[in-house]
Amino acid sequence: MKHNLFVSLPILLALMILSSCDPNGNLFFNKTFRAGKVEMSFSANGGKDETSIVNSSHKPVKGKIGWSFSQVYTVDEKNNFKYILLQDKEEELPDGTYMVDAGWVKFYYPKKRNKIRVEVAPNPNKEMRKLIFDGGGGPVYYINIVIKQAGKTD
């Protein structure tokens, strides 16, 4: 009986993980951030604490470039929980970096887009805030991101 448990448990866990993946095996879910700053470094091979950002190039991601905010949304809590497309909020700063300002969450990243800093404002009602990574109806590819707390190293 113990042998069957040790064999069937890993198989069951693998099936649970695969059921939450897209057809290419990429995890895809809503990512929730607590208030504060989070450092994200992009890696095509993934790593610990992975989530996904949609790549709008319609090609599999290779290397560390090619992602965008084309299908990433926040929820406007003051306007009937309407989705806000972040791509429309992108602007270049005087120092050559880019920022996407979505109100309670701000993204800062260099032109080469190999790192991103996320700043999340505290929510007055103490609830978690959500970013929505929406694959839409067409062909979608993902880039894995490794999330690190600011100031921490591997």
Image (cartoon, rainbow, N blue to C red):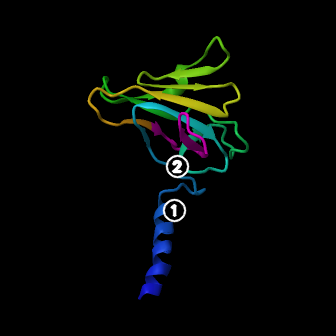
Q: Which residues are magenta?
A: 132-154
Image marks 2 and 1: residues in contact by CB distance under 8 Å: no
Q: Is residue 154 above or below residue 11?
A: above
Give the residue at mark 1. Answer: 18
Q: What amino acid is at disc 2?
A: Asp
- Give the total number of marks visible in the rendering: 2
Q: Which mark is residue 52?
A: none
**Residue at position x 68%, y 47% in the image:** 60
Quadrant holding the N terminus: bottom left
Please identify the quarter of the rendering in which residue 98 is found.
top right
Which of discs 2 and 1 lies nearer the camera? The answer is 2
Quadrant holding the C terminus: top right
**Residue at position x 44%, y 43% in the image:** 30
Q: Residues within 10 Å of mark 2 (few under 14, many from 20)?
A: few
Q: Residue furthest top?
A: 94
Q: Is residue 154 above or below residue 13?
A: above
**Residue at position x 45%, y 85% in the image:** 4
Q: What amino acid is at disc 1?
A: Leu
Residue 29: x %, y % from top left: 46, 47
Residue 3: x %, y % from top left: 47, 86
Badge 2 element = loop
Tell me which label, 2 or 1, sits earlier in the chain: 1
Q: Which mark is residue 49?
A: 2
